[in-house]
Image (cartoon, rainbow, N blue to C red):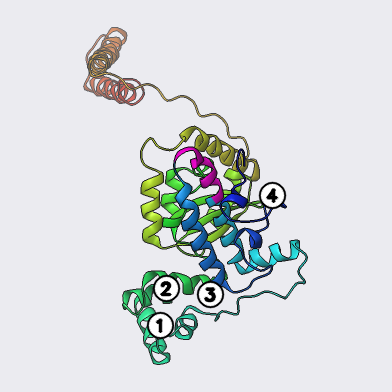
């Protein structure tokens, strides 16, 4: 960052590596595994840096806030943290949050629900086709944020309060509004080869593929409240706010990538162009001509027989009527409609 060493001046980090590693940035001991402590330090530092988010240091403060958010999301995601710790030289298997495995076990361990209520929640969820996360919220046993934290523990992902986040504009521009609305998600940042995306639940394979095709990066999901995601979409994707040209370019690239993956279809013969529809006047004119031609066909047949035989007969009159009718039907079918 230019002009000022914000790490030293704002966070009190001594001179050294810039940017500092996640633990140093969040003022933690290296390889800290206590998720509550990691989040507590993040909240404290986030509040402190926001004091500088005006005037001449607006840009620097926002960059630092994003760095703090990325560090917190990495260190509170069990899988991402293990990868990061290994990159710093930690032996594998040393980390792990030790949190309970399921939503209900997590809530019971935190004494937010009783062990007796677990069975009630399971029955309520089964009867209504709900997840346990949604069931405990609908039963008003816990607050939505606590249920989100429990689901994050079960899925081994981080969770985030979007009110504390300011997503990267360049990342928001890459994903169009229709995609974030469809999947109830919000792109946040690019971090260490991943695109961080806030989701209300475990992301679908369709969303992961959509992100990869548009951004040429795999996504890493973090959980957030559905209500917060919807509010953030309304805020950051207000009409005319996003750079739709970037999203359009990603749309084209994604479509081309999908097309390249599909086997080439056999060439089909081109269909003959359809005859243009006739106007009402044209239809009337052709119908009149059809009647005239049919009548003359009948008259010609009867007149010809009289010229040849020298007499008028019922048989040739009927033949003339049949020929005139056949001509009328043929012309109606192929020409005058």
Asked if residue 62 is among those painted magenta in the image, a careful observer would answer: yes
> Mark 1 or mark 2, which has the lower sequence index?
1
Crowd class of label 3 (few under 14; some 14 to 19; many from 20; radius 10 Å): some
> Mark 1 or mark 4, which has the lower sequence index?
4
Q: Residue furthest bottom?
A: 116
Residues drawn in magenta: 55-64
Q: Return the residue nearer the eye: 199 or 286.
A: 199
- Residue 69, position as x, y percentages in the image: 54, 56
Which numbered marker is on residue 112? 1
Q: Is residue 3 left or right of residue 336?
A: right
Nearest to the eye among marks 4 and 2: give it: 4
> Mark 3 or mark 4, which has the lower sequence index?
4
Q: Return the residue nearer the eye: 72 or 96.
A: 72
The answer to whether marks 1 and 2 mark residues whose Cβ atoms lie closer than 8 Å is yes
Q: CA distance from mark 3 to mark 2?
A: 13 Å
Mark 4 lies on a secondary structure that is loop
Nearest to the eye among marks 1 and 4: give it: 4
Crowd class of label 4 (few under 14; some 14 to 19; many from 20; radius 10 Å): few
The answer to whether marks 3 and 4 mark residues whose Cβ atoms lie closer than 8 Å is no
Q: CA distance from mark 4 to mark 2?
A: 36 Å
> Mark 1 or mark 3, which has the lower sequence index?
1
Asked if residue 99 is among those painted magenta in the image, a careful observer would answer: no
């Amino acid at each position: 960052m230019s002009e000022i060493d914000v790490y030293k001046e704002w966070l009190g980090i001594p001179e050294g590596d810039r940017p500092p590693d996640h633990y140093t940035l969040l003022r933690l001991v290296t390889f800290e595994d206590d998720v509550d402590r990691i989040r507590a330090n993040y909240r404290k530092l986030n509040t402190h840096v926001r004091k500088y988010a005006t005037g001449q240091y607006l840009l620097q403060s926002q960059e630092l806030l994003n760095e703090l958010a990325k560090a917190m999301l990495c260190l509170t995601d069990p899988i991402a943290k293990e990868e990061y710790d290994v990159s710093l030289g930690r032996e594998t298997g040393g980390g792990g949050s030790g949190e309970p495995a399921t939503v209900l076990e997590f809530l019971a361990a935190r004494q937010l629900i009783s062990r007796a209520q677990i069975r009630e929640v399971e029955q309520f969820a089964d009867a209504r086709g709900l997840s346990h996360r949604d069931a405990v919220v609908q039963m008003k046993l816990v607050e939505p944020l606590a249920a989100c934290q429990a689901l994050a523990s079960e899925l081994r992902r981080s969770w985030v309060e979007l009110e504390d986040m300011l997503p990267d504009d360049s990342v928001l521009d890459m994903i169009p509004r229709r995609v974030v609305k469809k999947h109830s998600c919000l792109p946040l940042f690019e971090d260490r080869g991943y695109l961080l995306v806030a989701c209300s639940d475990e992301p679908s394979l369709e969303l992961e593929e959509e992100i990869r095709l548009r951004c040429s990066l795999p996504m890493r999901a973090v959980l957030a409240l559905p209500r917060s995601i919807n509010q953030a979409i309304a805020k950051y994707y207000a009409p005319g706010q996003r750079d739709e040209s970037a999203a359009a370019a990603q749309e084209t690239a994604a479509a081309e990538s999908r097309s390249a993956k599909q086997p080439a279809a056999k060439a089909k013969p081109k269909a003959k162009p359809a005859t243009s529809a006739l106007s009402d006047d044209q239809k009337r004119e052709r119908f009149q001509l059809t009647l005239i031609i049919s009548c003359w066909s009948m008259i010609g047949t009867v007149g010809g027989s009289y010229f040849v035989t020298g007499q008028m007969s019922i048989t040739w009159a009927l033949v003339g009527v049949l020929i005139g009718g056949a001509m009328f039907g043929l012309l109606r079918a192929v020409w005058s409609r």
